[in-house]
Image (cartoon, coloured by chain):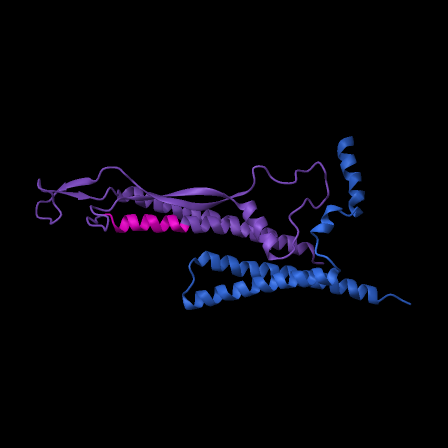
Amino acid sequence: MQNSLDKISSLGNLTDAKKDATKVAPSGDFSKVLENTLSEVNKAQQVGDKAMADIATGEVKDLHQAAIAIDKAQISMKLMLEVRNKALSAYKEISKTQI
Amino acid sequence: MAFLSNFDISGYGLSAQRFRMNVISSNIANADTTRTSEGGPYRRREVIFKAINFDKTLNNAIENSNNMLKYENPLDDSSAPNDADPSVMSVAVDKVVRDSSNFKMKYDPTNPDANKDGYVAYPNVNPVIEMSDLIEATRAYQANVAAFQSAKSMAQSAIDILKG
């Protein structure tokens, strides 16, 4: 019981930044991170598009690989949209600040 | 896209089962074939699967794509294990082997492939076994699809955390 309480109280240290994360983390600011993620999503979209074109032209090797590529594009797009909504609502919240 | 890795694991499984289904279909199609390019009647073929280290593949892909982070324990909990040991394995087709059991001999002296005693060697394919293997491959494929759908709905739930 006491042990689990210790575990819970250790959650207060979540603000400690990882020291070793800096050497692999995307350098720069939040916009850089967003840009990287966007390019990743865009890549998934292109792969999904190619999969759909392959299905249409009958060039697809495995039907399930095409389906998986399309699903990846869909899920990553949804995640990107939610992150965008979060960022926008945070921005709106900040811009409402009274000066 | 590291967070979609379970999609790829199921994808490997689906490809393997589909390949196995192709081999079983060729066994059924050639159940009466007495002539092959190798000489002699058709031999039954079987597929051997091999587990491949999926984590290595995934981390190579992550390093090559862009500077994405390797998966880490998000809560910074030192007591939690960092990497699963043994690591997550996926499946690939290792090889196709021939069944070396004896051919079925039928007495048919009018057949051009008959030997001097009038017997013809037919492939060592038992259609009943092939049909049950086919059902097995189909069910395994469906199981992989079910795992994929579960992974998809989990990803959807995780995205729903952001809503509201």
Give the percent coordinates (x, y) of residue A82: 68, 61
- Quadrant containing the C terminus of chain B is bottom right
Quarter of the figure with the N terminus of chain B: bottom right
Among the chains pictured, the one given purple colouring is B
Left or right, B100 with reference to B10: left
Whether residue B145 is visible to the viewer of this picture, yes or no, is no
Up-down relation of residue B48 to residue B25 (above or below): above
Residue at coordinates 38% horizontally, 48% vertically from top-left?
B20
- On the image, the x and y values in percent for residue A32 come to 71, 62
Whether residue B24 is in magenta: the answer is yes
Q: Residue A35: image x %, image y %?
A: 68, 63
Q: Colour of chain A?
A: blue
The span picked out in magenta is: B18-31
**Residue B50 sits above or below residue A95 on the image:** above
Left or right for A69, reference A37: left
Q: List x then y, in percent, for residue B126.
A: 26, 42
Regarding residue B134, the answer to whether it shows in the image is yes
Query: Is residue B119 toward the left or the right of residue B160 in the image?
Result: left
Query: Would you place residue B98 above or below residue B151 in this image?
Result: above
Q: Is residue A58 toward the left or the right of residue B153 in the image?
A: left
* B117 inside magenta stretch: no
Which residue is located at x 44 percent, y 51 percent? B15
User: Along the line of sight, which residue is nearer the eye, B28 or B53?
Assistant: B53
Magenta span main SS: helix
Q: Residue at image x 27%, y 38%?
A: B100
- The residue under the point 21% across, 40% down is B103
Q: Residue furthest right?
A: A99
